[in-house]
Amino acid sequence: MSHRSVRPAPVRLSAMAAGCALLLATAVGCGNEADSNDSASDPAASETSSTTPSPSDSSSDSPSQTPSESGDTSDSSSGAGGSLTVGDKVTAGQAVVVSASNVTVEPTKRASALVDDAAVDAFVSSTDPQLADPIRSAVRAATVPAGSTLFGAVVAVGCDSPTDVGWSTTFDGVEVSATLPKTQVQCLVPETYVALFLVPDM
């Protein structure tokens, strides 16, 4: 009786190996597809990554702030000033105006400090006696409080008495101006008007 040796069929092993390789490739492909599907289905993650600004973007968007430079806008040529109404008494807010006719003195923009009798004498020396006497009387009647100085100036020549007197301090002293009423009054003999007023000491 003859014996035959039985050998496994090589075709079957090759088929089984090919099947396993196919299953492994399918599993790997499914895993990659699932990961890609998860990323696509999460819009929040995609939006966060696309909208988060970089530090350079944030710094470029914020406006640069430069401290404002403020200079002194006050007028350096005028330290103080004011406007006074004309009345019958020299006060902090009121001036006295005296006048006389037939006086040859002209108005001036510069006021004189009447600090004593010598200053008053120098002030009236350039005018006529008919105006010097009213000036002296008005100076004697004025009450000068501490911290103020009495000033005088010829402010107008004409037919109308000033209604207001303005003054301002400059590097050269105290300058004065007068406000006259707007009238059409004409007179044969014009009056010369002198204002006396107080200026606070600087």
Image (tube, rainbow, N blue to C red):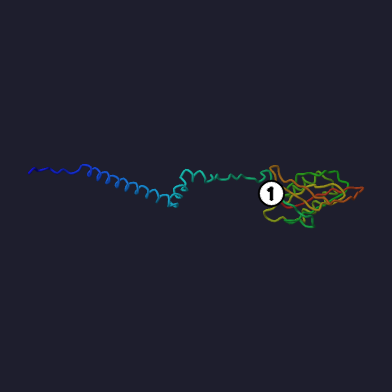
Q: Split into 4 quadrants, where in the image is the N terminus?
A: top left
**Viewer-proximal residue, 125 or 154?**
154
Position of residue 60 measured from the top left corner of the image (x, y, whole percent): 51, 43
Q: Is residue 36 left or right of residue 191?
A: left
Position of residue 149 measured from the top left corner of the image (x, y, whole percent): 71, 51
At a point 75% along the width and 53% down the height, the residue shown is: 84
At a point 31% along the width and 45% down the height, the residue shown is: 25
At a point 69% along the width and 49% down the height, the residue shown is: 80
Query: Hey, what amino acid is under mark 1?
Result: Ala
Query: Callout 1 environment at 10 Å: few (<14), some (14 to 19), or many (20+)?
Result: some
**Viewer-proximal residue, 35 or 28?**
28
**Viewer-proximal residue, 187 or 6?**
6
Residue holding disc 1: 80
Position of residue 85 measured from the top left corner of the image (x, y, whole percent): 77, 55
Say which element carries label 1: loop
Residue most extreme to the front: 1
Q: For residue 170, what is the image quadrant?
A: top right
**Viewer-proximal residue, 77 or 144?**
77
Residue most extreme to the right: 188
